[in-house]
Image: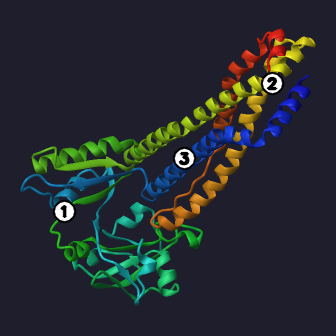
Amino acid sequence: MIYETFREAFQNIWGNKFRTFLTMLGIIIGVMAVMVIVGLGNGMTTSIQDEFADMGTNTLSVQVMGYGARSVKINDFYAIVEAHPDIFSAVSPTASLSGSVKVGTETDAYSSTSVKGVSEAYLDMAGYRLATGRALNYVDMADNKKVCLVGDYISRVGYGGNAIGQSIKIGSEKYTIVGVLEAKIDDPSDQEGSSDDCIFVPYTTAMRVSKISTASSYAVYVANDDDLAQGKTILENGLQELLHSDSGYMVISLSEMLDMMTSMVNMVVTVLTAIAAISLLVGGIGIMNIMMVSVTERTREIGIRKALGAKERVILALFVVEAGVTSALGGIIGIGLGYLVSAIATKVLAVLITDMTLTVTPTLSSIAVAFGISVGIGVLFGYLPAKRAARLNPIEALRYD
């Protein structure tokens, strides 16, 4: 009974291949879109988590904008941190340094290189280890020395692994490389734009070159994760006391920032997935329409079946199974296309976005949900035409021309 029902369903689908394909198109596009969008969201979330993992979630990021004519001197900020050694274990002012990076005459390979001014404490805070040479030290900060540390990517691509003592140009200034950092990324082909594609200079040098009188950004390392909230409060109170205002600064933990960015990505993915799911709904309506047409075309066949003793449930099952098989086939094709588009999108994103590693990785759960919904929609929207077919009067059906 069940075998015969499925066999007839496949026969009817095969007999109207082109019409069936057009009917499945909404399901195919819907399943594919859901897979790609959810995969992109997973890739973005993973990329964000990897970026924050370099710094550690027990780091507080501080932005000091100042209030009116008031600003926060670096020594004053250090005083806030050093007054609580039981809470804070390290602090580093950070300063961005603009300008293209040039090794010899080559600049294209370093368009994604991160250049940052930091203190001698920053390497440990960010989880970097020294491979060769020396680290930045207090004398480098005090004398505004034009020295730098480079990541493994810069050393390998620009200097063939022998970067110590060589010069590198950032903007219009030349810096001497005094240290090379250990690689964080195992695959060399993935290093460009990653945490291994970086240059660190003394923050005082970066401030002088950028003509900045005081730091506006700090990274503060909290020794214990449980003390993050207390550390944030201490910094906020100290800055409020210095600025006599609570609107000239912002203190946020990287874990809060990670949660915020992840929530934003999830919200965007949810909205886009809902939009993509409309294709599944449209596909369901298409299945209902085509099954209505099929019932009309096969009215005499239904009449003959009922005249020969076929029960309503048999007629009902025949059309419901046909609708379910149609949507299931559409779902399978959609899954195949989803994997194909995801692979293509990953390669395209690698070319377009070089400052971060972004992949489109569909999950089994999203595939299962999309496929289940597609089959469910087919059965649901196929039920009404099937019910209509099952209730046809056999005498009237036989008279139908």
Residue at image coords 26%, 81%: 145
Query: In the picture provided, is 122 more to the left or to the right than 287?
Result: left
Amino acid type, callout 1? Ile
Q: From the top left corner, tell me how far across and down residue 224 is, in percent.
A: 40, 47
Sequence-wise first label, 2 or 3 = 3
* Nearer-the-camera pick, 21 or 397: 397
Considering depth in this image, is 62 or 19 the residue closer to the camera?
Answer: 19
Q: Nearer the viewer, mark 2 or mark 3?
A: 2
Q: Residue at x 46, y 66 (%)?
A: 195
Q: Amino acid at mark 3?
A: Ile
Q: Secondary structure at mark 2?
A: loop
Q: Residues within 10 Å of mark 1 (few under 14, many from 20)?
A: some
**Residue 176 placement: quadrant:** bottom left
- The percent position of residue 45, horizontal first and vertical second, equals 50, 49
Instruction: Measure the C-alpha gap from mark 1 to mark 2.
Output: 84 Å
Residue name at image x 54 percent, y 50 percent: 40
The residue indicated by pointer 2 is: 298
Q: Which residue is mark 3?
A: 37
| Quarter of the image with the C terminus in it | top right
Q: Is residue 274 visible?
A: yes
Residue visible at 31% across and 53% down in the picture? 61
Q: Position of residue 297 (x, y in %)?
A: 77, 26
Mark 3 residue crowding within 10 angstroms, few (<14) / some (14–19) / many (20+): many
Residue that mark 1 sits on: 74
Q: Along the polypeptide, which appears first: circle 1 or circle 2?
A: 1
